[in-house]
Amino acid sequence: MDRARLYEYLELQSFSPDEMNLAFRTISTFSSLRLTHDQDDVIDKTQIQAFLVDRLAQIQNQIVNDNQNNVHIQDTDFTEEQRLEYAQQDAERFLQVFVNHSRGSGNNNENGPAGITVSKDQFVQTLTEMATAVDMKRMWPITASILLVGTSVGVVLPAMPFVVEALQLTPGQYGTVVSAFALSKMASNIPSAILVERHGRKPYLTYSLVLIAFGVGGIGFAGSFGELYLCRLLTGAGVAALTTASQLMVTDVSTPLNRATTMSPIVSAFAAGTALGPALGGTMVDQVGLQNTFAMVGASYLGVAILNSIILKETKPPKQPLLHLFHDLPWVKLPLTNQKQQDKISNVAPVDNNNSNNENNRSQTEKDDSTSLATAAKDALAQWIPLFHNDQIRSVMIMNGFYWFALSGSQMTLLPLILTSPAPTGLEMSAGAVGQIYMSMSLVQVLSNPLMARYLVDRIGKAAAISGGCTVIAASMISLPLWTNPPENWPIFVGTLGFWALGSSMLSTAPLAYISDKVTEDKRAQAIAMLRTSGDVGFLLGASCTGGFADLLGGSLDLAMQSSGGLLSAATFWFIVRQKLLWNTNGSAESTTGTTGTSTRDKKRH
Protein backbone atom coordinates (compact mmCIF):
# COMPACT_ATOMS: atom_id res chain seq x y z
CA MET A 1 0.00 0.00 0.00
CA ASP A 2 1.22 3.47 -0.83
CA ARG A 3 2.36 5.34 2.29
CA ALA A 4 0.30 8.40 1.44
CA ARG A 5 -2.85 6.27 1.23
CA LEU A 6 -2.01 4.55 4.53
CA TYR A 7 -1.49 7.91 6.25
CA GLU A 8 -4.78 9.19 4.80
CA TYR A 9 -6.71 6.18 6.04
CA LEU A 10 -5.30 6.73 9.54
CA GLU A 11 -5.74 10.53 9.33
CA LEU A 12 -2.14 11.16 10.41
CA GLN A 13 -0.99 14.77 10.34
CA SER A 14 1.37 15.46 13.23
CA PHE A 15 2.54 11.80 13.42
CA SER A 16 2.72 12.07 17.20
CA PRO A 17 2.45 8.94 19.40
CA ASP A 18 -0.90 10.19 20.71
CA GLU A 19 -2.24 10.50 17.17
CA MET A 20 -1.05 6.99 16.28
CA ASN A 21 -2.48 5.54 19.49
CA LEU A 22 -5.80 7.21 18.70
CA ALA A 23 -5.80 5.62 15.23
CA PHE A 24 -5.08 2.20 16.78
CA ARG A 25 -7.86 2.59 19.35
CA THR A 26 -10.28 3.60 16.59
CA ILE A 27 -9.54 0.41 14.64
CA SER A 28 -9.77 -1.73 17.79
CA THR A 29 -13.34 -0.54 18.45
CA PHE A 30 -14.60 -2.51 15.45
CA SER A 31 -15.76 -6.10 15.94
CA SER A 32 -13.26 -8.93 15.65
CA LEU A 33 -13.78 -12.56 14.63
CA ARG A 34 -11.01 -13.76 16.94
CA LEU A 35 -12.18 -16.64 19.13
CA THR A 36 -10.25 -15.34 22.13
CA HIS A 37 -9.71 -11.76 23.23
CA ASP A 38 -6.92 -12.30 25.71
CA GLN A 39 -4.89 -9.77 23.74
CA ASP A 40 -6.76 -6.49 23.93
CA ASP A 41 -3.89 -4.47 22.45
CA VAL A 42 -3.96 -6.15 19.04
CA ILE A 43 -5.97 -5.65 15.87
CA ASP A 44 -6.72 -8.14 13.11
CA LYS A 45 -7.84 -8.13 9.50
CA THR A 46 -11.57 -8.15 10.24
CA GLN A 47 -11.25 -5.02 12.38
CA ILE A 48 -9.08 -3.31 9.80
CA GLN A 49 -11.53 -4.18 7.02
CA ALA A 50 -14.48 -2.80 9.00
CA PHE A 51 -12.47 0.34 9.77
CA LEU A 52 -11.63 0.80 6.08
CA VAL A 53 -15.27 0.44 5.05
CA ASP A 54 -16.13 3.24 7.48
CA ARG A 55 -13.22 5.42 6.29
CA LEU A 56 -14.09 4.84 2.63
CA ALA A 57 -17.57 6.18 3.29
CA GLN A 58 -16.05 9.30 4.89
CA ILE A 59 -13.56 9.72 2.05
CA GLN A 60 -16.33 9.26 -0.52
CA ASN A 61 -18.38 12.03 1.13
CA GLN A 62 -15.34 14.31 1.26
CA ILE A 63 -14.64 13.75 -2.45
CA VAL A 64 -18.26 14.62 -3.26
CA ASN A 65 -18.10 17.77 -1.11
CA ASP A 66 -14.82 18.87 -2.68
CA ASN A 67 -16.04 18.34 -6.24
CA GLN A 68 -19.73 19.23 -5.83
CA ASN A 69 -21.50 18.35 -9.10
CA ASN A 70 -18.40 16.95 -10.81
CA VAL A 71 -18.59 13.53 -9.13
CA HIS A 72 -21.22 10.83 -9.49
CA ILE A 73 -21.66 8.06 -6.90
CA GLN A 74 -23.19 4.80 -8.08
CA ASP A 75 -25.53 3.90 -5.21
CA THR A 76 -26.70 0.32 -5.83
CA ASP A 77 -26.51 -3.05 -4.13
CA PHE A 78 -23.62 -3.87 -6.42
CA THR A 79 -21.85 -0.73 -5.16
CA GLU A 80 -21.97 -2.08 -1.61
CA GLU A 81 -20.40 -5.32 -2.80
CA GLN A 82 -17.69 -3.35 -4.59
CA ARG A 83 -17.01 -1.32 -1.46
CA LEU A 84 -16.66 -4.43 0.71
CA GLU A 85 -14.40 -6.13 -1.84
CA TYR A 86 -12.28 -2.99 -2.15
CA ALA A 87 -11.93 -2.71 1.64
CA GLN A 88 -10.97 -6.39 1.87
CA GLN A 89 -8.18 -5.97 -0.68
CA ASP A 90 -6.88 -2.82 0.99
CA ALA A 91 -7.03 -4.51 4.40
CA GLU A 92 -4.64 -7.18 3.11
CA ARG A 93 -2.31 -4.48 1.75
CA PHE A 94 -2.65 -2.59 5.04
CA LEU A 95 -1.58 -5.64 7.04
CA GLN A 96 1.23 -6.44 4.63
CA VAL A 97 2.86 -3.09 5.39
CA PHE A 98 3.31 -4.09 9.02
CA VAL A 99 4.24 -7.69 8.22
CA ASN A 100 6.97 -6.65 5.79
CA HIS A 101 8.30 -4.04 8.19
CA SER A 102 8.28 -6.32 11.23
CA ARG A 103 8.90 -9.73 9.69
CA GLY A 104 10.12 -12.18 12.29
CA SER A 105 8.72 -10.12 15.17
CA GLY A 106 6.67 -13.07 16.47
CA ASN A 107 3.26 -12.19 15.04
CA ASN A 108 0.97 -15.11 14.28
CA ASN A 109 0.84 -15.36 10.50
CA GLU A 110 0.80 -19.11 10.03
CA ASN A 111 -2.85 -19.03 8.91
CA GLY A 112 -2.22 -16.46 6.21
CA PRO A 113 -3.47 -12.84 6.19
CA ALA A 114 -6.62 -13.70 8.11
CA GLY A 115 -4.57 -14.89 11.08
CA ILE A 116 -2.22 -11.93 11.25
CA THR A 117 -2.52 -9.56 14.19
CA VAL A 118 -0.76 -6.28 14.84
CA SER A 119 0.01 -5.15 18.38
CA LYS A 120 -0.26 -1.55 19.47
CA ASP A 121 3.48 -1.28 20.05
CA GLN A 122 4.19 -2.77 16.63
CA PHE A 123 1.63 -0.44 15.06
CA VAL A 124 3.13 2.72 16.58
CA GLN A 125 6.74 1.63 16.07
CA THR A 126 6.22 0.76 12.41
CA LEU A 127 4.44 4.01 11.61
CA THR A 128 7.05 6.04 13.50
CA GLU A 129 9.94 4.38 11.68
CA MET A 130 8.21 4.82 8.32
CA ALA A 131 7.52 8.51 8.96
CA THR A 132 11.01 9.14 10.36
CA ALA A 133 13.02 7.47 7.60
CA VAL A 134 14.34 9.87 4.96
CA ASP A 135 13.40 8.96 1.42
CA MET A 136 16.96 9.08 0.08
CA LYS A 137 15.89 7.56 -3.22
CA ARG A 138 14.10 10.82 -3.98
CA MET A 139 16.48 13.04 -2.01
CA TRP A 140 19.85 12.12 -3.50
CA PRO A 141 19.18 13.76 -6.90
CA ILE A 142 18.29 17.13 -5.37
CA THR A 143 21.17 16.78 -2.87
CA ALA A 144 23.64 16.16 -5.69
CA SER A 145 22.24 19.16 -7.56
CA ILE A 146 22.57 21.46 -4.56
CA LEU A 147 26.15 20.25 -3.95
CA LEU A 148 27.06 21.27 -7.49
CA VAL A 149 25.22 24.56 -7.13
CA GLY A 150 27.02 25.33 -3.87
CA THR A 151 30.36 24.54 -5.47
CA SER A 152 29.58 26.85 -8.38
CA VAL A 153 28.63 29.63 -5.97
CA GLY A 154 31.90 29.14 -4.10
CA VAL A 155 33.93 29.19 -7.31
CA VAL A 156 32.62 32.67 -8.17
CA LEU A 157 33.54 34.29 -4.81
CA PRO A 158 37.30 34.75 -5.35
CA ALA A 159 36.80 35.67 -9.01
CA MET A 160 34.44 38.63 -8.59
CA PRO A 161 37.05 41.12 -7.28
CA PHE A 162 39.07 40.61 -10.46
CA VAL A 163 36.00 41.37 -12.56
CA VAL A 164 35.76 44.65 -10.67
CA GLU A 165 39.41 45.33 -11.39
CA ALA A 166 39.03 44.50 -15.09
CA LEU A 167 36.03 46.83 -15.46
CA GLN A 168 37.65 49.50 -13.25
CA LEU A 169 34.57 49.82 -11.03
CA THR A 170 34.49 52.01 -7.94
CA PRO A 171 33.54 50.53 -4.55
CA GLY A 172 30.15 52.19 -4.92
CA GLN A 173 29.54 50.57 -8.29
CA TYR A 174 30.63 47.19 -6.97
CA GLY A 175 28.27 47.56 -4.01
CA THR A 176 25.45 48.28 -6.43
CA VAL A 177 26.35 45.15 -8.40
CA VAL A 178 26.28 43.06 -5.21
CA SER A 179 22.92 44.53 -4.19
CA ALA A 180 21.45 43.75 -7.64
CA PHE A 181 21.32 40.10 -6.62
CA ALA A 182 19.24 40.91 -3.53
CA LEU A 183 16.98 43.28 -5.48
CA SER A 184 16.22 40.66 -8.11
CA LYS A 185 15.75 37.92 -5.52
CA MET A 186 13.30 40.01 -3.51
CA ALA A 187 11.32 40.91 -6.64
CA SER A 188 11.25 37.28 -7.79
CA ASN A 189 10.33 35.55 -4.53
CA ILE A 190 6.56 35.96 -4.84
CA PRO A 191 6.36 35.23 -8.61
CA SER A 192 8.55 32.17 -8.06
CA ALA A 193 6.25 30.88 -5.34
CA ILE A 194 3.24 31.34 -7.62
CA LEU A 195 4.86 29.63 -10.62
CA VAL A 196 6.30 26.73 -8.63
CA GLU A 197 2.94 26.13 -6.97
CA ARG A 198 1.12 26.22 -10.31
CA HIS A 199 3.46 24.29 -12.58
CA GLY A 200 5.38 22.06 -10.19
CA ARG A 201 8.84 21.82 -8.61
CA LYS A 202 10.83 20.01 -11.29
CA PRO A 203 10.45 22.63 -14.07
CA TYR A 204 11.91 25.37 -11.88
CA LEU A 205 14.73 23.16 -10.62
CA THR A 206 15.69 23.06 -14.30
CA TYR A 207 14.72 26.44 -15.78
CA SER A 208 16.16 28.34 -12.82
CA LEU A 209 19.59 26.78 -13.39
CA VAL A 210 19.48 27.78 -17.05
CA LEU A 211 18.80 31.36 -15.96
CA ILE A 212 21.64 31.21 -13.42
CA ALA A 213 23.94 29.71 -16.07
CA PHE A 214 23.43 32.68 -18.39
CA GLY A 215 23.75 35.12 -15.50
CA VAL A 216 26.98 33.68 -14.08
CA GLY A 217 28.49 32.75 -17.44
CA GLY A 218 27.80 36.23 -18.76
CA ILE A 219 29.77 37.87 -15.94
CA GLY A 220 33.04 36.80 -17.54
CA PHE A 221 32.02 38.44 -20.81
CA ALA A 222 30.54 41.63 -19.31
CA GLY A 223 32.22 44.68 -20.77
CA SER A 224 30.54 47.38 -18.72
CA PHE A 225 28.84 48.12 -15.43
CA GLY A 226 25.39 47.79 -17.03
CA GLU A 227 26.11 44.36 -18.47
CA LEU A 228 27.49 43.14 -15.15
CA TYR A 229 24.43 44.50 -13.33
CA LEU A 230 22.12 42.67 -15.75
CA CYS A 231 23.98 39.40 -15.16
CA ARG A 232 23.53 39.76 -11.41
CA LEU A 233 19.81 40.43 -11.88
CA LEU A 234 19.46 37.22 -13.89
CA THR A 235 21.33 35.30 -11.21
CA GLY A 236 19.12 36.62 -8.41
CA ALA A 237 15.93 35.70 -10.26
CA GLY A 238 17.23 32.20 -10.92
CA VAL A 239 18.28 31.67 -7.30
CA ALA A 240 14.83 32.78 -6.08
CA ALA A 241 13.14 30.13 -8.24
CA LEU A 242 15.72 27.47 -7.36
CA THR A 243 15.40 28.09 -3.62
CA THR A 244 11.61 28.05 -3.71
CA ALA A 245 11.42 24.85 -5.76
CA SER A 246 14.01 22.96 -3.70
CA GLN A 247 12.46 23.89 -0.35
CA LEU A 248 8.97 22.91 -1.49
CA MET A 249 10.27 19.63 -2.91
CA VAL A 250 11.76 18.76 0.48
CA THR A 251 8.46 19.62 2.16
CA ASP A 252 6.58 17.42 -0.31
CA VAL A 253 8.62 14.28 0.41
CA SER A 254 8.88 14.66 4.18
CA THR A 255 6.68 14.34 7.25
CA PRO A 256 6.69 16.38 10.48
CA LEU A 257 8.91 13.68 12.01
CA ASN A 258 11.69 13.87 9.40
CA ARG A 259 11.40 17.34 7.87
CA ALA A 260 14.55 18.74 9.50
CA THR A 261 16.44 15.51 8.82
CA THR A 262 15.32 15.59 5.21
CA MET A 263 16.49 19.18 4.84
CA SER A 264 19.86 18.40 6.46
CA PRO A 265 21.51 16.73 3.42
CA ILE A 266 20.63 19.73 1.26
CA VAL A 267 21.98 22.25 3.77
CA SER A 268 25.14 20.21 4.29
CA ALA A 269 25.62 19.75 0.55
CA PHE A 270 25.38 23.48 -0.11
CA ALA A 271 27.72 24.28 2.80
CA ALA A 272 30.24 21.72 1.57
CA GLY A 273 30.05 23.18 -1.92
CA THR A 274 30.61 26.74 -0.76
CA ALA A 275 33.54 25.57 1.39
CA LEU A 276 35.28 23.72 -1.45
CA GLY A 277 34.35 26.09 -4.26
CA PRO A 278 36.53 29.12 -3.39
CA ALA A 279 39.78 27.16 -3.48
CA LEU A 280 38.77 25.65 -6.81
CA GLY A 281 37.74 29.06 -8.13
CA GLY A 282 41.00 30.68 -7.14
CA THR A 283 42.99 27.95 -8.86
CA MET A 284 40.85 28.18 -12.00
CA VAL A 285 41.31 31.95 -12.29
CA ASP A 286 45.07 31.57 -11.95
CA GLN A 287 45.27 28.67 -14.41
CA VAL A 288 42.66 29.28 -17.13
CA GLY A 289 41.84 32.96 -16.76
CA LEU A 290 38.86 34.98 -15.62
CA GLN A 291 36.63 34.66 -18.69
CA ASN A 292 37.12 30.91 -19.02
CA THR A 293 36.39 30.41 -15.31
CA PHE A 294 32.97 32.04 -15.55
CA ALA A 295 32.25 30.22 -18.81
CA MET A 296 33.04 26.88 -17.18
CA VAL A 297 30.89 27.69 -14.14
CA GLY A 298 28.02 28.68 -16.42
CA ALA A 299 28.42 25.42 -18.33
CA SER A 300 28.35 23.50 -15.03
CA TYR A 301 24.96 25.04 -14.20
CA LEU A 302 23.66 23.94 -17.61
CA GLY A 303 24.98 20.46 -16.88
CA VAL A 304 23.13 20.35 -13.57
CA ALA A 305 19.97 21.58 -15.32
CA ILE A 306 20.19 18.71 -17.81
CA LEU A 307 20.86 16.29 -14.95
CA ASN A 308 17.83 17.55 -13.03
CA SER A 309 15.58 17.19 -16.06
CA ILE A 310 16.58 13.52 -16.26
CA ILE A 311 16.79 12.32 -12.66
CA LEU A 312 14.31 14.47 -10.72
CA LYS A 313 10.69 13.43 -10.36
CA GLU A 314 7.80 15.80 -9.74
CA THR A 315 6.61 15.92 -6.12
CA LYS A 316 3.93 18.61 -6.28
CA PRO A 317 0.80 17.40 -4.46
CA PRO A 318 -2.34 17.20 -6.61
CA LYS A 319 -5.01 19.85 -6.24
CA GLN A 320 -7.45 17.15 -5.13
CA PRO A 321 -5.31 14.77 -3.05
CA LEU A 322 -8.19 12.51 -1.99
CA LEU A 323 -9.37 12.04 -5.56
CA HIS A 324 -5.77 11.40 -6.59
CA LEU A 325 -5.19 8.78 -3.88
CA PHE A 326 -8.52 7.05 -4.43
CA HIS A 327 -9.04 7.53 -8.16
CA ASP A 328 -9.50 3.76 -8.52
CA LEU A 329 -12.70 3.58 -6.46
CA PRO A 330 -14.97 1.76 -8.95
CA TRP A 331 -18.19 3.36 -7.68
CA VAL A 332 -16.90 6.97 -7.92
CA LYS A 333 -17.22 8.42 -11.42
CA LEU A 334 -16.51 11.79 -12.97
CA PRO A 335 -18.93 13.01 -15.67
CA LEU A 336 -17.93 12.44 -19.29
CA THR A 337 -17.31 16.16 -19.75
CA ASN A 338 -14.49 15.91 -17.22
CA GLN A 339 -12.84 12.90 -18.84
CA LYS A 340 -9.52 14.74 -19.28
CA GLN A 341 -9.49 15.59 -15.59
CA GLN A 342 -10.26 11.96 -14.70
CA ASP A 343 -7.50 10.70 -16.99
CA LYS A 344 -5.02 13.15 -15.53
CA ILE A 345 -5.89 12.10 -11.99
CA SER A 346 -5.59 8.43 -12.93
CA ASN A 347 -2.18 9.02 -14.59
CA VAL A 348 -3.30 7.56 -17.93
CA ALA A 349 -3.20 9.05 -21.41
CA PRO A 350 -5.96 11.67 -21.82
CA VAL A 351 -8.84 11.09 -24.19
CA ASP A 352 -9.81 14.00 -26.43
CA ASN A 353 -13.59 14.36 -26.36
CA ASN A 354 -13.54 17.65 -28.33
CA ASN A 355 -15.79 19.12 -25.67
CA SER A 356 -15.74 22.88 -25.18
CA ASN A 357 -16.53 22.36 -21.51
CA ASN A 358 -12.90 21.32 -20.98
CA GLU A 359 -11.74 24.80 -21.96
CA ASN A 360 -14.33 26.35 -19.67
CA ASN A 361 -13.20 24.12 -16.82
CA ARG A 362 -9.57 25.09 -17.35
CA SER A 363 -10.44 28.80 -17.46
CA GLN A 364 -12.43 28.44 -14.26
CA THR A 365 -9.53 26.59 -12.61
CA GLU A 366 -7.08 29.34 -13.54
CA LYS A 367 -9.52 31.93 -12.22
CA ASP A 368 -9.84 30.00 -8.96
CA ASP A 369 -6.02 29.80 -8.72
CA SER A 370 -5.73 33.57 -9.07
CA THR A 371 -8.43 34.11 -6.47
CA SER A 372 -6.72 31.69 -4.08
CA LEU A 373 -3.36 33.43 -4.53
CA ALA A 374 -4.91 36.84 -3.91
CA THR A 375 -6.63 35.52 -0.81
CA ALA A 376 -3.39 33.94 0.42
CA ALA A 377 -1.54 37.24 -0.06
CA LYS A 378 -4.20 39.11 1.94
CA ASP A 379 -4.08 36.49 4.69
CA ALA A 380 -0.28 36.75 4.86
CA LEU A 381 -0.42 40.54 5.14
CA ALA A 382 -3.06 40.24 7.83
CA GLN A 383 -0.64 38.06 9.84
CA TRP A 384 2.41 40.27 9.26
CA ILE A 385 0.88 43.38 10.84
CA PRO A 386 0.16 41.92 14.30
CA LEU A 387 3.45 40.01 14.21
CA PHE A 388 5.39 43.22 13.67
CA HIS A 389 3.51 44.83 16.55
CA ASN A 390 4.99 42.20 18.87
CA ASP A 391 7.91 43.95 20.61
CA GLN A 392 10.08 40.84 20.86
CA ILE A 393 9.60 39.84 17.23
CA ARG A 394 10.07 43.39 15.95
CA SER A 395 13.36 43.83 17.80
CA VAL A 396 14.83 40.69 16.22
CA MET A 397 13.56 41.72 12.76
CA ILE A 398 15.30 45.07 13.05
CA MET A 399 18.49 43.52 14.41
CA ASN A 400 18.52 40.97 11.60
CA GLY A 401 18.16 43.75 9.05
CA PHE A 402 21.14 45.65 10.52
CA TYR A 403 23.20 42.46 10.58
CA TRP A 404 22.63 41.78 6.89
CA PHE A 405 23.21 45.46 6.11
CA ALA A 406 26.64 45.27 7.73
CA LEU A 407 27.43 41.82 6.33
CA SER A 408 26.62 42.63 2.70
CA GLY A 409 28.48 45.91 2.92
CA SER A 410 31.61 44.56 4.60
CA GLN A 411 32.09 40.85 3.88
CA MET A 412 30.51 40.81 0.43
CA THR A 413 31.57 44.22 -0.88
CA LEU A 414 34.57 45.68 0.98
CA LEU A 415 36.47 42.54 2.06
CA PRO A 416 37.00 41.22 -1.50
CA LEU A 417 38.31 44.64 -2.54
CA ILE A 418 40.64 44.84 0.48
CA LEU A 419 42.06 41.41 -0.32
CA THR A 420 42.75 42.13 -4.01
CA SER A 421 43.34 45.88 -4.35
CA PRO A 422 46.93 47.12 -4.85
CA ALA A 423 48.89 48.37 -1.85
CA PRO A 424 48.58 50.47 0.19
CA THR A 425 44.76 50.25 -0.15
CA GLY A 426 44.64 46.46 -0.28
CA LEU A 427 46.69 43.28 0.05
CA GLU A 428 47.18 42.42 -3.66
CA MET A 429 46.27 38.76 -3.12
CA SER A 430 46.04 36.35 -6.01
CA ALA A 431 42.81 34.59 -6.88
CA GLY A 432 44.11 31.40 -5.28
CA ALA A 433 44.90 33.16 -2.01
CA VAL A 434 41.48 34.82 -1.94
CA GLY A 435 39.90 31.41 -2.50
CA GLN A 436 41.78 29.99 0.47
CA ILE A 437 40.61 32.87 2.68
CA TYR A 438 36.95 32.31 1.83
CA MET A 439 37.31 28.55 2.09
CA SER A 440 38.80 28.88 5.57
CA MET A 441 35.97 31.14 6.73
CA SER A 442 33.39 28.72 5.30
CA LEU A 443 35.04 25.76 7.03
CA VAL A 444 34.99 27.58 10.38
CA GLN A 445 31.26 28.12 9.96
CA VAL A 446 30.56 24.56 8.80
CA LEU A 447 32.44 23.08 11.77
CA SER A 448 31.19 25.48 14.44
CA ASN A 449 27.52 25.78 13.39
CA PRO A 450 26.31 22.61 15.16
CA LEU A 451 28.40 23.36 18.25
CA MET A 452 27.07 26.91 18.53
CA ALA A 453 23.50 25.75 18.01
CA ARG A 454 23.77 23.03 20.66
CA TYR A 455 25.89 24.62 23.36
CA LEU A 456 25.22 28.34 22.96
CA VAL A 457 21.88 29.03 21.28
CA ASP A 458 19.84 26.29 22.96
CA ARG A 459 21.50 26.43 26.39
CA ILE A 460 22.38 30.07 27.01
CA GLY A 461 19.61 31.65 24.96
CA LYS A 462 18.80 32.96 21.51
CA ALA A 463 18.93 36.64 22.41
CA ALA A 464 22.34 36.16 24.05
CA ALA A 465 23.63 34.40 20.93
CA ILE A 466 22.39 37.23 18.70
CA SER A 467 24.01 39.85 20.93
CA GLY A 468 27.26 37.89 21.24
CA GLY A 469 27.50 37.07 17.54
CA CYS A 470 26.90 40.65 16.43
CA THR A 471 29.42 41.91 19.00
CA VAL A 472 32.12 39.54 17.72
CA ILE A 473 31.43 40.46 14.09
CA ALA A 474 31.38 44.20 14.80
CA ALA A 475 34.68 43.96 16.71
CA SER A 476 36.21 42.02 13.80
CA MET A 477 35.06 44.65 11.29
CA ILE A 478 36.50 47.49 13.32
CA SER A 479 39.84 45.80 14.04
CA LEU A 480 40.50 44.11 10.67
CA PRO A 481 41.86 47.25 8.92
CA LEU A 482 44.47 47.56 11.69
CA TRP A 483 46.13 44.31 10.57
CA THR A 484 46.30 44.79 6.79
CA ASN A 485 50.08 45.03 6.66
CA PRO A 486 51.35 41.44 6.35
CA PRO A 487 53.57 39.56 6.79
CA GLU A 488 54.22 40.81 10.34
CA ASN A 489 50.50 41.06 11.16
CA TRP A 490 49.38 38.10 9.05
CA PRO A 491 48.53 35.73 11.98
CA ILE A 492 46.41 38.43 13.64
CA PHE A 493 44.70 39.24 10.33
CA VAL A 494 43.78 35.58 9.74
CA GLY A 495 42.70 35.17 13.36
CA THR A 496 40.41 38.19 13.06
CA LEU A 497 38.73 36.65 10.02
CA GLY A 498 38.34 33.43 12.00
CA PHE A 499 36.56 35.27 14.82
CA TRP A 500 34.41 36.96 12.20
CA ALA A 501 33.32 33.56 10.88
CA LEU A 502 32.74 32.36 14.45
CA GLY A 503 30.40 35.29 15.07
CA SER A 504 28.48 34.38 11.93
CA SER A 505 28.09 30.85 13.30
CA MET A 506 26.48 32.23 16.46
CA LEU A 507 23.91 33.96 14.26
CA SER A 508 23.28 31.09 11.85
CA THR A 509 20.35 29.65 13.82
CA ALA A 510 19.67 32.09 16.67
CA PRO A 511 17.28 34.57 14.96
CA LEU A 512 15.25 31.78 13.36
CA ALA A 513 15.03 29.83 16.62
CA TYR A 514 14.10 33.00 18.54
CA ILE A 515 11.26 33.86 16.15
CA SER A 516 9.99 30.27 16.10
CA ASP A 517 9.71 30.29 19.89
CA LYS A 518 7.65 33.47 19.95
CA VAL A 519 4.73 32.48 17.74
CA THR A 520 2.14 29.76 17.49
CA GLU A 521 2.58 27.03 14.91
CA ASP A 522 -0.01 28.45 12.50
CA LYS A 523 1.84 31.80 12.35
CA ARG A 524 5.36 30.40 12.20
CA ALA A 525 5.69 30.33 8.40
CA GLN A 526 4.77 34.01 8.06
CA ALA A 527 7.02 35.00 10.96
CA ILE A 528 9.97 33.26 9.30
CA ALA A 529 9.07 34.92 5.99
CA MET A 530 9.18 38.30 7.72
CA LEU A 531 12.58 37.48 9.19
CA ARG A 532 13.98 36.59 5.76
CA THR A 533 12.47 39.71 4.23
CA SER A 534 14.18 41.90 6.83
CA GLY A 535 17.47 40.23 5.90
CA ASP A 536 16.84 40.77 2.18
CA VAL A 537 16.14 44.46 2.74
CA GLY A 538 19.35 44.79 4.76
CA PHE A 539 21.30 42.93 2.07
CA LEU A 540 19.95 45.23 -0.64
CA LEU A 541 20.67 48.47 1.17
CA GLY A 542 23.94 47.45 2.81
CA ALA A 543 25.96 46.61 -0.29
CA SER A 544 24.96 49.71 -2.27
CA CYS A 545 25.12 52.17 0.64
CA THR A 546 28.46 50.90 1.98
CA GLY A 547 30.07 50.95 -1.46
CA GLY A 548 28.74 54.46 -2.09
CA PHE A 549 30.03 55.59 1.31
CA ALA A 550 33.50 54.28 0.41
CA ASP A 551 33.38 56.43 -2.73
CA LEU A 552 32.47 59.48 -0.63
CA LEU A 553 35.48 58.75 1.57
CA GLY A 554 37.76 58.90 -1.46
CA GLY A 555 38.01 55.13 -1.84
CA SER A 556 39.00 54.49 1.77
CA LEU A 557 38.01 50.84 2.20
CA ASP A 558 39.39 50.63 5.73
CA LEU A 559 37.33 53.53 7.06
CA ALA A 560 34.20 52.26 5.32
CA MET A 561 34.75 48.82 6.90
CA GLN A 562 35.13 50.34 10.36
CA SER A 563 32.00 52.43 9.80
CA SER A 564 30.04 49.25 9.09
CA GLY A 565 31.38 47.79 12.31
CA GLY A 566 30.39 50.92 14.19
CA LEU A 567 26.86 50.79 12.82
CA LEU A 568 26.52 47.13 13.80
CA SER A 569 27.90 47.93 17.27
CA ALA A 570 25.29 50.65 17.76
CA ALA A 571 22.50 48.33 16.60
CA THR A 572 23.76 45.60 18.93
CA PHE A 573 23.83 47.99 21.89
CA TRP A 574 20.24 49.02 21.09
CA PHE A 575 19.21 45.34 20.90
CA ILE A 576 20.80 44.52 24.27
CA VAL A 577 19.08 47.49 25.93
CA ARG A 578 15.81 46.53 24.29
CA GLN A 579 16.11 42.95 25.53
CA LYS A 580 16.83 44.24 29.04
CA LEU A 581 13.68 46.36 28.95
CA LEU A 582 11.65 43.42 27.67
CA TRP A 583 13.12 41.29 30.45
CA ASN A 584 12.01 43.80 33.06
CA THR A 585 8.56 44.05 31.49
CA ASN A 586 7.82 40.38 30.76
CA GLY A 587 9.99 38.70 33.36
CA SER A 588 12.17 37.04 30.72
CA ALA A 589 13.19 38.08 27.26
CA GLU A 590 13.32 34.41 26.33
CA SER A 591 9.77 33.70 27.45
CA THR A 592 7.53 32.38 24.75
CA THR A 593 4.74 34.78 23.84
CA GLY A 594 2.96 32.22 21.73
CA THR A 595 2.56 28.54 22.15
CA THR A 596 4.02 25.91 19.93
CA GLY A 597 1.23 23.55 20.69
CA THR A 598 -1.21 21.89 18.39
CA SER A 599 -2.79 24.14 15.81
CA THR A 600 -6.40 24.06 14.74
CA ARG A 601 -5.47 21.94 11.75
CA ASP A 602 -3.97 19.34 14.06
CA LYS A 603 -6.92 19.38 16.43
CA LYS A 604 -9.52 18.48 13.86
CA ARG A 605 -9.55 17.35 10.28
CA HIS A 606 -11.18 19.61 7.73
Image (spheres, grey):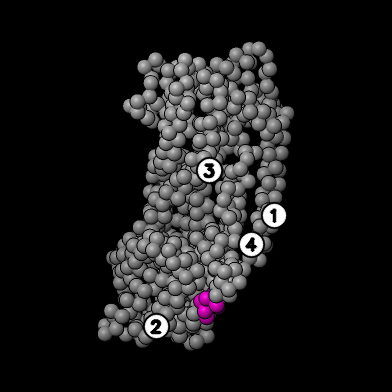
Depicted 421 relative to depicted 64: above or below: below
Residue 387: mark in rendering: 4
Provide the secondary structure element on which disc 3 rests: loop
Q: Choose the circle earlier in sequence order: 4 or 3.
A: 3
Which of the two labelled residues, at mark 4 and mark 2, occupies the earlier sequence position? 4
Q: Residues within 10 Å of mark 1 (few under 14, many from 20)?
A: few
In this view, 107 is above or below 85:
below
Q: Tell me the element at label 2.
A: helix
Place of residue 517 in the rendered image (x, y in percent of width and height, measured from the top left) = 54, 59
What kind of element bears circle 1? Answer: helix
Numbered range of the magenta stretch = 570-577
Q: Amino acid at mark 1?
A: Lys
Q: Nearer the viewer, mark 4 or mark 2?
A: 4
Q: Mark 3 or 1, which is nearer the eye?
A: 3
Do the numbered discs 3 and 1 sit on residues whose CB atoms are within 8 Å?
Answer: no
Residue 70 part of the magenta segment:
no
Can you see residue 484?
Answer: yes
Q: Earlier in the sequence, mark 2 or mark 1?
A: 1
Q: Callout 3 environment at 10 Å: few (<14), some (14 to 19), or many (20+)? A: some
- Res. 479 mark: 2
Q: In which image quadrant can residue 391 be found?
A: bottom right
Q: Amino acid at mark 4?
A: Leu
> Of the numbered discs in the image, which one, if any, rests on residue 68?
none
